[in-house]
Image: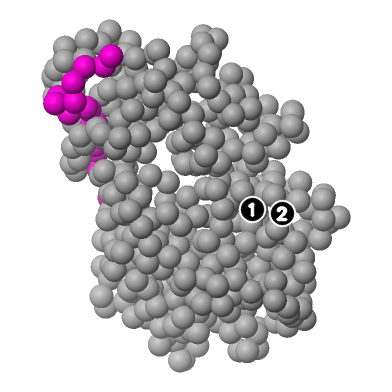
Amino acid sequence: MMKKVLNKRKIINDPIYGFVTIPNDLIYDLINHAYFQRLRRIKQLGMTNLVYPGALHTRFHHAIGAMWLMVEAIKVLQSKGVQINEQEEEATIIAILLHDIGHGPFSHALEHTIVSGVSHEDISAMLMKKLNQEFEGKLSLAIKVFNDKHPKKFLHQLVSSQLDMDRLDYLKRDSFFTGVSEGVISSDRIIKMLNVRKNQLVIEEKGIYSIEKFIIARRLMYWQVYLHKTVLSAENMLVKILQRAKELATKKIELFCSPALRYFLYNKCGKKDFAQDPKLIELFAQLDDYDIFGAIKVWSTHEDKILSYLCKCMIDRTLYKIEIQNKEFSSSYIKQKQKEIAKTFDLKNNEIDYFVFTKSVANEIYNVDKIGINLLFRDGKVKDISKSSDQLNVEVLNKTVRKWFLCYPRLTDGQVR
């Protein structure tokens, strides 16, 4: 067990778990670092508050919650004789604490617009490397756990797997703040049932019903919250706003921006650029929700009619109408909508893609081809949940559900001026 250094400054009152104690000085210093404090300024659920007004919690909340669950999980495993030394314990807690540190504002919108081919996982790895340099190598073991390079594979599974502390926290937390009760899970019981066999994380047989509930809750939360059709409309409108801003920036048209946002809009920023220019990661670490939404407020009065219209729609929550179905939309139907919208809004051919667009989304409930959720039975046998549950159908579990959506302005919204 790690030696616990306790004092007043190291207790956080979390709305989900109550009083959370920060385990030690290194973790306390990481939490107070500017990279981590930035997560206070990034909402966990992006535009979801436009549907569920309470969904204003941040990635800071989530990271602290996941850290606390990891502390509890390691205690449980140690109490059952699983060998986790002090250094491994600290490293695994740091790995989960920093797992989302690379998320940008409205991260998925950002990943497809102002940066190219750079995921939040890539940014997380870069920031953790910089933190390790700053903390004189004290994060080296945490990075190994994070990247699944540590010989104790179950430590990485606690951080990232189909049953990890990340998922346990975000399901419970997102359910709480959205008010969607279908996402409520018994994280306490799941953690109490954790064990390790043959270097793999397992759940003791008694926890089977809690795991079934966890899998079902995750599926329901995806369709009711994460992939809610109005959320999809808002998030994709944000993508279009940033695409238009990037297009105008490449034409050297002046846009109001914070210095960090300006750099990413007016310069090419791909994976190679991040590798070649160390300053880029520092600039990225200055971006948060305020940069984006502050710009959107100002852009709502920009002379470019497309940018200003999209931004005003976002500010006023005049979101595009969205149709969603289980198959692709026919090209004839899409062309019909494009014609209607182009006529109503007096659009040129090269402008219509900002107003009518179609994409698909997928919900993967459980992947039996990955390292799954394994149950430990009293006779010592270990079986995947898909082969053990009498409630969950394997074919349904392993099926990726894909849906297509079509977005366009409501014809009553008027002209683009």
Q: Is residue 403 magenta?
A: yes
* Residue for point 69% across, 37% down: 281
Q: Is residue 261 visible?
A: yes
Residue type at the position of mark 2: His
Residue 188 at x, y percent in the picture = 46, 80
In the image: residue 291, left or right of residue 399:
right
Task: Report how far apart the C-alphas of labels 1 and 2 lie in the structure.
Answer: 6 Å
* Foreground residue among 111 and 23: 23
* Foreground residue among 117 and 24: 24
Query: Cβ–Cβ below 8 Å for labels 1 and 2?
Result: yes
Looking at the image, residue 404 lies above or below residue 409 = below
* Residue wearing tag 2: 33
- Under circle 1, the secondary element is helix
In the image: residue 153, left or right of residue 177:
right
Residue type at the position of mark 1: Gln
Looking at the image, residue 129 lies above or below residue 411 = below
In the image: residue 358, left or right of residue 283:
left
The image quarter containing residue 311 is top left
* Residue for point 65% across, 85% down: 78
Residue 37 - label: 1
The image quarter containing residue 384 is bottom left
Q: Look at the image and give the residue range highlighted in magenta.
A: 398-417
Looking at the image, residue 315 lies above or below residue 151 = above
Quadrant the N terminus occupies: bottom right
The number of numbered discs placed on residues in the rendered structure image is 2
Q: Is residue 53 magenta?
A: no
* Residue for point 77% across, 65% down: 26
Residue 268 at x, y percent in the picture = 60, 21
- Under circle 2, the secondary element is loop
Residue 150 at x, y percent in the picture = 71, 63
* Residue for point 14% across, 26% down: 412
